[in-house]
Amino acid sequence: MQAFQEYYPENVAHCYGCGRLNHDGHQIKTVWEGDETVTRFQPRPEHTAIPGFVYGGLLASLIDCHGTGTAAAAMYRAENRAMDSLPAFRFVTGSLQVSYLKPTPLGPQLEIRGRIKEIKGRKVVVEATVYAEGIATARGEVIALQMPDTFTS
C-alpha cells in the first residue's frame, strides 16, 4: 500500500516532517489500517532529549504531520475519491495539542496511530497516539484545515 505522503503534489512535498522531497526531514509514511492510520518511525540518536529518551518536539512533529496526512486521506475517503485524484487535498495545522503521558524511550521504533474525530467542511480533527513497544507515551489532537490555494506557488 502506498503511503499518503507519496500522493502529495510536488509543490507541497517539502515539509520537514512528511515531505518526500525533503531529504533532511523525517519523511514519515502513513497508511490506513482499517479505520485507523498508522505511521512507524525510528528515532535516531540526534532525537535525544536526555540520554535514553526521545525529545518531546519530535513527538509533537510526528503527531502534527501524521494528523495532517490523516486529514487528507480522510477527506479523500469521505468523498469516495482515489488519493491521486484532482483537485488534491492538502491540509495545514490549525491547532496542535500534545499531552506527554510518559517518557518515550530512545531505541524502539515508534508507532503513531490516528483516528478521525470529526470532518466538518474544510476542517478535520484527528486524534493521534504515539506508542513505544506497545505503550502509549504521547497523545495529541490536530485540527487540520484544508490548505488554501494561496499557499501554493
Image: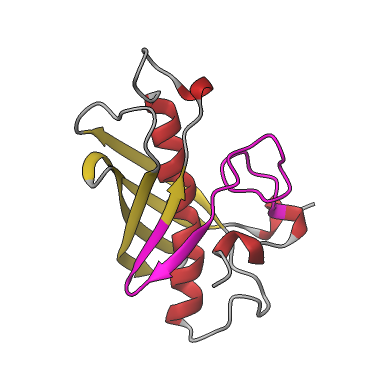
Q: Nearer the viewer, residue 70 or 54?
A: 54
Q: Please tell me whether residue 26 is drawn above or below residue 46 in the rendered image.
A: below
Residue at the far right: name it: 153
Q: Residue 27: within the magenta?
A: yes
Span shown in magenta: 12-38
Q: Residue at x 51, y 76 (%)?
A: 76
Q: Residue 9: within the magenta?
A: no
Q: Position of residue 27 (x, y in %)?
A: 60, 46
Q: Position of residue 85 (x, y in %)?
A: 65, 80
Q: Nearer the viewer, residue 75 or 102?
A: 102
Q: Nearer the viewer, residue 128 or 90?
A: 128
Q: Position of residue 28 (x, y in %)?
A: 54, 49
Q: Main secondary structure of the magenta part?
A: loop
Residue at the far bottom: name it: 80
Q: Please tell me whether residue 120 is drawn above or below residue 18 in the rendered image.
A: below
Name the side, left or right, on which 132 lies relative to 46: left
Q: Residue at x 54, y 55 (%)?
A: 29
Q: Position of residue 119 (x, y in %)?
A: 36, 69
Name the side, left or right, on which 147 lies relative to 43: right
The image quadrant where one finds the N terminus is: bottom right
Q: Residue at x 43, y 19 (%)?
A: 48
- Number of marks present in the image shown: 0
